[in-house]
Image (spheres, rainbow, N blue to C red):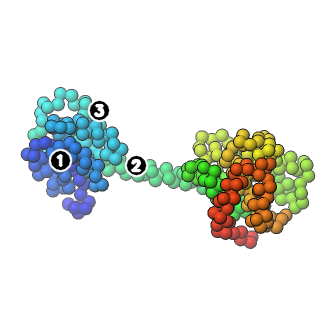
């Protein structure tokens, strides 16, 4: 037989010590055996840091009956999945469906037959093991699926950068700035994380803009601007209408990151709090990074100059409250800026 450490643990619950002795005698060669003479003790053991892998449960007990114990086990997420087999005296149970309804996996009758005890215990332990493994696999696959989805979302953001004169670092920095500002604006950790992952797609719509406009060295004429200003709508179309929370947020950000607080932005000319908060946050993060880094058409501004510009534009371009929050978290922002420095390319 395998090591003691590998042995499964069986909890025997019965108010009659002789019954416990019989079952223990049958099982202790192959399993670790714990015993409880009454229901509350059984629940305590089941809830311990070292819970049993299977419970053999007597029904008629003083105090909590086996049914009560089973019900409480099944009500508790920590103990819900431990298989319970009722062990009852002949004729003691007139309603076997009750036990099954409470979530028991099987019945055995006393006096117990050794081969039946061995077979049932082995079968239900194996089923339980399989269920746990399946759950592990599902969890692992779900994580893989999420990771893949996140990776595709990141790559979509990168695709837009290849068309644009921006760099991968821009997207990383502005997403991290967005997350910091989101937290400062009172979004919870989950929403802030969502924005971190959605922000890289803010300019994905630039995929739909002709190269001669995107990479034109001089300034754009009116007609070219009119095309350029379509990138938020292109972005929303590329991302599509999706049930996933991250893609929904990405769509909002792509569509509204050029709206301005005073209503003079595009594409919809939304004003104030009609502009979704996520987009107001990204607008600040995006512009701050554009200002403080070199672009083909401009030098990098100093942090002071960039902050002064955000403050000047507070109330016209930007949400003024968010600009003040940005200033409060500036030390954190600058840490990110220092960690993701542009490499020449
Ligand atoms: Fe944009
Ligand atoms: Fe950007």
Q: SS class of the residue under badge 1? A: strand
Q: Residues within 10 Å of mark 3 (few under 14, many from 20)?
A: few
The label nearer to you, 3 versus 1, is 1
Q: Between marks 2 and 1, how big is the CA–CA gap?
A: 29 Å
In the image, 339: left or right of 164?
left
Residue 312 in the image: state x and y as whole percent: 80, 55
Question: Is the CB of mark 3 within 8 Å of ligand 2?
Answer: no
Q: Which residue is mark 2?
A: 135
In the image, 187: left or right of 202?
left
Q: Quadrant of the C terminus?
A: bottom right
Q: Earlier in the sequence, mark 3 or mark 1?
A: 1
Which residue is depicted at the point 22% across and 46% down?
Answer: 42
Say how many tags the image has.
Answer: 3
Q: Earlier in the sequence, mark 2 or mark 1?
A: 1
In the image, 276: left or right of 50?
right
Residue at the extreme left of the image, as rendered: 18
Q: Between marks 3 and 1, how big is the CA–CA gap?
A: 23 Å
Q: Between marks 2 and 3, how big is the CA–CA gap?
A: 23 Å
Residue 216 in the image: state x and y as whole percent: 87, 59
Q: Nearer the viewer, residue 170 or 29?
A: 170
Q: Quadrant of the N terminus?
A: bottom left
The label nearer to you, 2 versus 3, is 3
The label nearer to you, 2 versus 1, is 1
Q: Which mark is residue 36?
A: 1
Which residue is depicted at the point 65% across and 55% down?
Answer: 181
Q: Which residue is mark 3?
A: 101
Residue at the extreme bottom of the image, as rendered: 344
- Asked if 88 appears above or below 31 in the picture, the reply is above
Q: Earlier in the sequence, mark 2 or mark 3?
A: 3
């Amino acid at each position: 037989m395998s090591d003691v450490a590998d042995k499964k643990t069986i909890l025997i619950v019965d108010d009659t010590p002789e019954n416990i002795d019989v079952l223990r005698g049958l099982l202790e060669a192959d399993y670790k055996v714990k015993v409880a003479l009454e229901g509350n003790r059984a629940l305590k053991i089941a809830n311990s840091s070292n819970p049993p892998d299977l419970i053999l449960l007597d029904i008629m007990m003083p105090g909590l009956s086996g049914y009560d114990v089973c019900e409480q086990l099944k009500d508790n997420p920590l103990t819900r999945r431990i298989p319970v087999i009722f062990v009852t005296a002949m004729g003691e149970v007139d309603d076997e469906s009750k036990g099954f309804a409470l979530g028991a996996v099987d019945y055995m009758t006393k006096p117990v037959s050794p081969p039946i005890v061995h077979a049932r215990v082995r079968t239900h332990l194996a089923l339980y093991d399989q269920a746990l493994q399946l759950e592990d696999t599902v969890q692992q696959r779900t994580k893989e699926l999420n990771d893949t989805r996140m990776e595709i979302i990141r790559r979509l953001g990168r695709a837009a950068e290849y068309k644009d004169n921006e760099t991968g670092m821009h997207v990383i920095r502005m997403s991290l700035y967005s997350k910091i500002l989101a937290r400062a604006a009172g979004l919870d950790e989950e929403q802030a994380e969502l924005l971190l992952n959605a922000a890289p797609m803010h300019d994905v719509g630039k995929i739909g803009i002709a190269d001669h406009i995107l990479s034109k060295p001089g300034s754009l004429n009116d007609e070219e601007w009119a095309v350029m200003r379509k990138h938020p709508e292109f972005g929303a179309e590329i991302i599509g209408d999706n049930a996933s929370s991250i893609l929904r947020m990405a769509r909002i950000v792509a569509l509204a990151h050029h709206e301005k607080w005073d209503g003079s932005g595009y594409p919809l000319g939304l004003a104030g709090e009609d502009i979704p908060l996520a987009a107001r946050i990204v607008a600040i993060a995006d512009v701050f990074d554009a200002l403080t880094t070199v672009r083909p058409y401009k030098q990098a501004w100093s942090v002071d100059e960039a902050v002064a510009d955000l403050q000047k534009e507070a109330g016209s371009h930007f949400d003024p409250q968010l600009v003040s929050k940005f200033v409060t978290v500036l030390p954190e922002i600058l840490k990110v800026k220092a960690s993701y420095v542009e490499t020449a390319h």
